[in-house]
Amino acid sequence: MSCNQGSSPEVPKRTRKNEATPKVGTGLSTMTRSDAFVAPKITPKFTDVAELCGVAFERFSDIVPGRFFLPEIMGGGAAWFDYDGDGWLDLYVVNGCQLDDPDLSQTNYVNRLFRNEGNGSFSDVTFSSGALENGYGQGCAVGDFNADGFPDLYVTNFGKNSLLENNGDGTFSKVGSMAGVNDPSWGTSTVWLDLDDDSDLDLYVVNYLDLHRGNSEVCEYNGKKGYCGPGSYQATADRVYLNQNDGTFIESAGKMGLEAVDGKGLAVIAADFDYDGMPDVYVANDMAANFLFTRTRDLADGPRSSSQFHNVAQASGCAVSRDGKNEASMGIACADFDGDGLIDIFLTHYFQAKNTLYRNRGSLIFDDDSRRSRIAATSFATLGFGTATFDYDRDGGIDLFITNGHVLGPEHEPFAMKPQLLRNDGTGRFDDISPLAGEYFLDRFVGRGVATGDYDNDGDADLAVTHLHRPMSLLRNETETGRHFLGLQLKTATRTLAVGGRVVLTFGKQKRVIALTSGGSYLSSSDSRLLVGLGDFSGTVDLEIRWPSGKVEQFQGLENDRYWLIVEGHQSMPFTLP
């Protein structure tokens, strides 16, 4: 079997001590899952082609039996991005190292960069590219911080974080210290976005716990030792770095109103949830109330200032569950799940505690819609981490992938869990169709990160999934739909991510609104291109793009089944291979 089947659309040429006396665990969350599903019209098919395609990677987490040092069990992320500008998505994967000294230079365990050769195979270019970050890696995020046209990487660690600048010649340079973003806290997920309206990308870095070998504890669950959860430790404040447009950043959480206490964050996403033209920031916290930061003044407590953010999650209804309880939020995904044009929020949660779908009612008001949407019924028997949105069958309904796996340790059951594919029926209700999706979905993994990206440019989303104790998987989407798609790569006038903008597509009698977001999942970064399922519609598509700058542009007659590059203020261009 080839790992690059099918025809490709036209794309452009470019490239404390661990022996402590165990105590009863605190802080980890403690209806059954419905395994029934409605057979879909189009059967999903995903095949793990990682080994076949040359993506050979298994995370080293330095797990020592009996130590129960929490970072061991958290896993790492992955990122899809075209680092060399050749039109094909490359893959970056975050590794661990020996935890005795995560800041010590180590070459046995480094992050990996796999270059897409354009023929379905990948080459490991880690060392030749200089992308061999060697801390105890957690997450990664893609963003062109200097707007030179080449995407850069921010890597979070249990230890000092790192910024890898893309030199534009296939190599990277470590500039985190010089840039002022080498925060030594326990970083997890990161999002790039323009926070201060100066047209360059800033950084919101989520931090987790104040944990080190000196205060690490061992907990006991049902008579067995295990990892202590977040309730055993203090939170560490998130960091906000404003881009000075000279290669440096200034930490500005207080200045921007983005200081918050007791976060214990694991995931973050940026989106304009109320379509006021200013991106908002949502942070998923582990057994603490989630954050929704906005500059919308109607809901904000305290002084009304459009230059400062305010946490309105409680007032908005998306801080805790419908029952008023904190939830153990791990991963996050946002999309318009019910087709009303508004961005909804999906969160993965702990074992025997439902995942949550917050339905956006408009004006920054959300409802916990987990039961009506059938999200609750599909999640009580799982512990979810990374999650991703995509339209597997091109019917226009946004579907969900979730990678699952427990955190107490292999001494506890269950530990490894099956991943899930949830099909959206078009109304924001979901069916678990995982048993139909291929062999991978019948197996059990300790899943952690997931990133989506159309690595073979065939117009559907493929999945890179990271695990503990097993190699990562590259799930090629081989679903035969017979339906059509439109691919879009959108860049602002300063050639950066169009975070906070939105696209209105008109095709036939249909109209669809798609928000431009950044971040999401867990520790991971997905392809920034948009893939829109058009169903059976085979005609041309009209677009209206509302850019973060406020400018509105219209484009008519875009052919489907191909990718289009649109830069603010310029004509649309189809991607073309030479």
Image: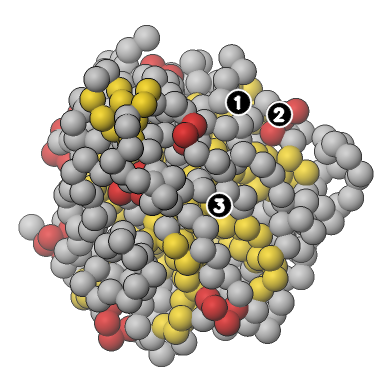
Q: Quadrant of residue 221?
A: top left
| Residue 80 position in % (x across, y down) | 38, 63
Q: Amino acid at mark 1?
A: Val
According to the picture, the residue beneath numbered tag 3 turns out to be: 206
Q: Is residue 284 above or below residue 281?
A: above
Residue at 76% x, 70% y is 198
Identify the secondary structure beneath mark 2.
helix
Q: Quadrant of residue 169?
A: bottom left
In the rendered image, the residue lying farthest to the top is 31
Residue at 21% x, 40% y is 66
77 and 478: which one is in front?
77
Within 10 Å of the Cα at label 2, are there few (<14), some (14-19), or many (20+) other Cα atoms?
Answer: some
| Residue 404 position in % (x across, y down) | 30, 36
Residue at 76% x, 63% y is 196
Residues under labels 1 and 3: Cα distance?
19 Å
Q: In this rendering, would 108 be left or right of 374?
A: left
Q: Quadrant of the C terminus?
A: bottom left
Image marks 2 and 1: residues in contact by CB distance under 8 Å: yes
Q: Tell me the number on the disc at residue 504.
A: none
| Residue 488 position in % (x across, y down) | 51, 61
448 and 218: which one is in front?
218
Q: Amino acid at mark 3?
A: Val
138 and 571: which one is in front?
138
Within 10 Å of the Cα at label 1, are there few (<14), some (14-19), or many (20+) other Cα atoms?
Answer: many
Residue 284 shows in the view: no
Q: Tell me the number on the disc at residue 320.
A: 1
Identify the secondary structure beneath mark 3.
strand
